Amino acid sequence: MIGWVGGGPWGPVACALGEPEAALDLVRVLATSGVWWMHLPRIPAAEIAARLPVRHQDDWDYRWTSAAPPGVPGEDRVVEVGRAHDDAVADLLERAFPGTTTRPGDPRIRAWYGVWDGDRLIAAGADRSRGEVGFLAGLAVDPDRRGAGVGAALTAGMMRRLLDEFGVVSLGVMYDNSGAIRLYERLGFTQCLSRSSVSLDLPVDDAPVG
């Protein structure tokens, strides 16, 4: 089992890989030292809640590939979206992906990319690459344009850019988002690590501000 603590946008984050029981033992110790957000191997919610004061749990898949995607119609329309268009990105996310924590102004973001239809932003995603791995986040498509291949075009266009730079590109997807998983697998994201992310229900004085 491997565990470590890194910096996150809202304070320290504990991460663990390996056997779930050992990971839980580790993070129980870390939970007493100011860590309130944890990325663990996939563990049923009831098992985590029996050991930790859980505020919220997300079960998701970390997926990656080093292979270029097949050609996708429309991927040539994917362009970088500059800071001047932060309001357009924020508006799209409110309509298409209100639950995402990836937002304009997030210091983890290197750049936003998107697809425009005239002056309307109809798809966008963030480049949150770090270290030596490309990472796509906050991928969103206007609800009125879903099913038209815009999401596939956005993802493929961003993949090619990050593969050219890093040689490997990754993303996260909720474990039960079957439509997105089918799309990502079709584009080559077949390597998968199942994860559970947990925030702890700490006293107000102990929780970080963010």
Image (spheres, rainbow, N blue to C red):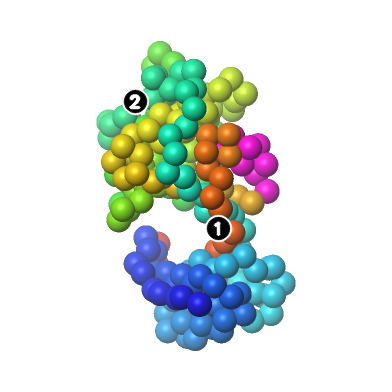
Q: Is residue 104 visible?
A: no
Alpha carbon separation for disc pair 1 and 2: 30 Å
Q: Quadrant of residue 45?
A: bottom right
Where residue 37 sits in the image (x, y, percent)?
A: 48, 69
Q: Quadrant of residue 90?
A: top left
Q: Amino acid at mark 1?
A: Leu
Q: Residue at x 46, y 82 (%)?
A: 30
Which callout, 1 or 2, points at the residue further toward the start of the chain? 2
Q: Residue at x 48, y 48 (%)?
A: 64
Q: Is residue 50 above or below residue 184?
A: below
Q: Residues within 10 Å of mark 1 (few under 14, many from 20)?
A: some
| Main secondary structure found in the magenta portion | helix
Pointer 1 residue: 193
The residue nearer to you, when weighing 81 against 148, is 148
Q: Amino acid at mark 2?
A: Val
Q: Is residue 138 above or below residue 52?
A: above
Q: Is residue 135 left or right of residue 174?
A: left
Pointer 2 residue: 79
Instruction: Point out the stretch of residues depicted in magenta.
Output: 176-184
The label nearer to you, 1 versus 2, is 1
- Residue farthest right in this picture: 46
